[in-house]
Image: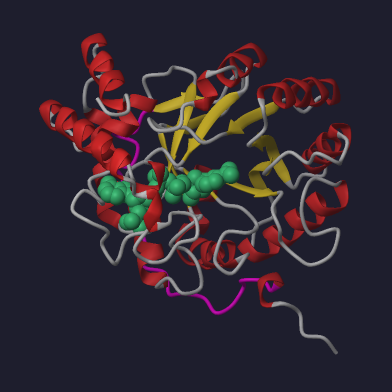
């Protein structure tokens, strides 16, 4: 008999001993923003488990990050079927910690997952067919030990599957009670408008779009944000720190314990270019002038856009969460500061 691949197994055992009581102050300082034209409020900062929640990552650290985030008002946790490595591991790790620490807080949490990228062999293990999306969510629910997720996303557009099928699967998922809301990620403005039209006609409006957005990647300003506004879709942005480039992490070289230093295939040492470092240095000086760190400034800059529902950060340690949440209490950027940032971002300035 063929063994069931590890990533499809559930997380019901072993259990970690429970010792966690969330801080009573957890809602005191976190601002919440409405996701488009919906009833759902999300924290200004959400936590993503793409990195640092894989099989090789110490579970004590993953657990500490989740606890600290929740204690600071981060009620939204973002996952995907393929987060790890290996694929499925982040959902399994999260399932274990949820079971031990957060069961009593499930109704205070918004948990999302996605399907779209390569997950299992054969023609039904990726992209946007009804077959793949529904099977993948069933697997995710088992790995996390959940009856439903709050948000389920199509992780990327599928050029070969009719949009009606992908959106029809999202609608079916909500009607079957396996997700409360649906979203899309990495869709173009045109694909977003069409997806929104189909979903609205089906009676399951699109809650969120999840694109990349940071000071170094502003592609959503050229059309997508306008579409989201017109369609009443919220926007939760990923890689707000450009995976660490918009922090002080790389200004003195590549630390061995950093994402680029650990051999990530998503942030290679060659991405730490002289131009990126020069821009980061200028921005860091500007941040210091405001009393902020560069990472805090990067988040403040994104939240200047009222259309952004939430900034989806990653963290390898609790102190990063502390720093980013503390940055929310600084004043908004003035017009003069925004102009300064524009100048800092110009190549060779
Ligand atoms: P970020 O741009 O926030 O990068 C996070 C990394 O930056 C951390 O792991 C850490 O790296 C470093 N960092 C964070 N805070 C600080 C700090 N205060 N000072 C110094 N360095 C810091 O986001 P990610 O790229 O991790 O993406 C966030 C989430 O977005 C993901 O977990 C996932 O949920 C989602 N996502 C969605 C995608 C999609 O296609 N829909 C694609 C990618 C991400 P280090 O390890 O070096 O400490």
Residue 164 image position (x, y, % from top left):
87, 32
Q: Measuring 17% from the left and 27% from the top, which residue is drawn there?
A: 286
Which region shows up in magenta?
Answer: 9-31
When the figure is inspected, residue 222 is found, relative to residue 236, above or below; the finding is above
Q: Can residue 98 be spotted in the picture?
A: yes
User: Which residue reaches farthest front?
Assistant: 348
Residue 340 image position (x, y, % from top left):
23, 18
Tell me if residue 181 is in the magenta stretch: no
When the figure is inspected, residue 160 is found, relative to residue 341, above or below; the finding is below
The C terminus is located in which quarter?
top left
Quarter of the image holding residue 119? bottom right
Residue 69 or residue 160, whichever sits in front: 160
Residue 45 or residue 278, whichever sits in front: 278
Q: Can residue 67 be spotted in the picture?
A: no
Q: Which is the main secondary structure of the residues drawn in magenta?
A: loop
Q: Measuring 69% from the left and 36% from the top, which residue is drawn there?
A: 182
Q: Is residue 84 left or right of residue 303?
A: right
Residue 89 image position (x, y, % from top left):
57, 67
Residue 302 or residue 251, whichever sits in front: 251
């Amino acid at each position: 008999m063929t063994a069931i691949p590890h990533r499809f197994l559930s997380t019901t055992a072993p259990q970690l001993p429970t010792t966690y009581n969330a801080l009573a102050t957890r809602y005191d300082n976190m601002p919440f923003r409405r996701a488009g034209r919906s009833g759902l409020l999300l924290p200004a900062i959400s936590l993503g488990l793409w990195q640092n929640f894989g099989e090789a990552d110490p579970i004590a650290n993953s657990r500490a990050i989740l606890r600290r985030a929740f204690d600071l008002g981060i009620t939204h946790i973002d996952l995907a079927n393929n987060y790890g490595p290996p694929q499925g591991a982040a959902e399994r790790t999260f399932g274990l910690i949820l079971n031990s620490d957060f069961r009593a807080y499930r109704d205070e949490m918004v948990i999302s997952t996605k399907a779209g990228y390569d997950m299992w062999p054969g023609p039904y293990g990726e992209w946007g067919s009804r077959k793949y999306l529904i099977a993948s969510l069933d697997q995710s629910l088992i790995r996390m030990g959940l009856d439903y997720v709050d948000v389920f996303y199509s992780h990327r557009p599928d050029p070969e599957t009719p949009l009606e099928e992908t959106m029809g699967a999202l609608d079916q998922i909500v009607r079957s009670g396996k997700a409360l809301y649906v979203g899309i990620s990495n869709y173009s403005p045109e694909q977003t408008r069409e997806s929104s039209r189909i979903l609205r006609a089906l009676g399951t409006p699109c809650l969120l779009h999840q694109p990349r957005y940071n000071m170094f990647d502003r592609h959503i300003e050229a059309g997508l944000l306008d579409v989201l506004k017109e369609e009443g879709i919220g926007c939760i942005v990923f890689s707000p720190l450009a995976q660490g480039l918009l922090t002080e992490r790389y200004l003195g070289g590549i630390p061995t314990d950093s994402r680029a230093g650990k051999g990530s295939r998503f942030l290679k040492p060659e991405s730490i270019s002289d131009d990126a470092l020069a821009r980061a240095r200028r921005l860091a000086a500007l941040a210091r002038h405001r009393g902020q760190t560069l990472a805090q400034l990067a988040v403040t800059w994104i939240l200047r856009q009222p259309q952004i529902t939430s900034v989806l950060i990653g963290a390898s340690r609790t102190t990063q969460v502390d720093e980013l949440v503390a940055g929310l209490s600084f004043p908004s950027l003035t017009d003069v500061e925004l102009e300064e940032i524009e100048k800092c971002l110009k190549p060779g300035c």
